[in-house]
Amino acid sequence: MPTGLKEGLPAPDFELLTDQGKKARLSEFKGKKLVLFFYPKDNTPGCTREACDFRDQIARIRKRGAEVAGVSVDSADSHRKFKEKFALNFPLLADPGKETVRAYGVWQEKSLYGKKYMGTVRTTVVIDAAGRIERIFDRVKVDGHVDEVLAALENAKGTP
């Protein structure tokens, strides 16, 4: 579970550059739910599949009153190329300074082939219209994940 994140608590604020080089803040999504998915790296197989799954289901997500944004530690320029290559229809937010991935507790020690390193743990956080954490999907498996998010949006209680 991401350190410090709990359902029902206010979501950590952020100010990040979008793939278009503009600043985006959590407060800009107030009044709508936000599906904020943290992923390790642009243009890698799992991350591409996850982003394309969100792209393909964006109409169903928006029908449930939510917007989508992806966050990784890649640069805004990398995000722009990734977004264009796969025709992604939601913003990608660049966190090269790692402030937001740390605030959300998803920058953690990982292990690959016995080597330990720090990286982003694939996590999705659903933030309600009031800016509170509604649902946390930790250590996400890409296959079927967007369906889980849609089910959570469908079953969510209204916001206060």
Image: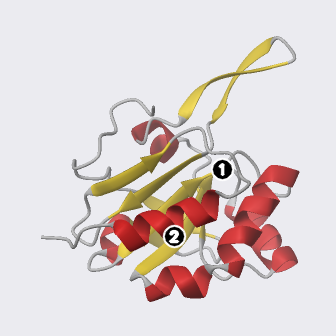
Residues packed near mark 1 inside 10 Å, few (<14), some (14 to 19) or many (20 plus): many
Q: CA distance from mark 1 to mark 2?
A: 18 Å
The disc at residue 151 is none
Image spot of residue 45 (x, y percent): 87, 53
The reply to whether discs 1 and 2 touch (Cβ–Cβ < 8 Å) is: no
Residue 92 vertical position relative to residue 95 in the rendered view, above or below: below
Q: What element does badge 1 sit on?
A: loop
Marks 1, 2: nearer the viewer? 2
Q: Which picture quadrant has residue 103?
A: top left
Three-letter amino acid code of the residue under disc 1: Tyr
Q: Residue at x 66, y 50 (%)?
A: 39
Q: Which picture quadrant has residue 71?
A: bottom right
Image spot of residue 81 (x, y percent): 82, 71
Three-letter amino acid code of the residue under disc 2: Leu
Judge by depth and name the residue closer to the eye, 75 or 149: 149
N-term mark: 1 or 2: 1
Q: Inspect this view and state whether residue 93 appears.
A: no
* Picture quarter with the N terminus: top left
Q: Residue at x 29, y 40 (%)?
A: 6
Q: What element does badge 2 sit on?
A: helix
Image spot of residue 16 (x, y percent): 50, 61
Q: Which residue extends farthest top?
A: 114
Image spot of residue 27 (x, y percent): 30, 70
Residue 110 vertical position relative to residue 41 in the rendered view, above or below: above
Q: Residue at x 42, y 42 (%)?
A: 104
Q: Inspect this view and state whether residue 32 appears.
A: yes
Which residue is the site of mark 2?
150
Judge by depth and name the residue closer to the eye, 89 or 102: 89
Which residue is the site of mark 1?
39
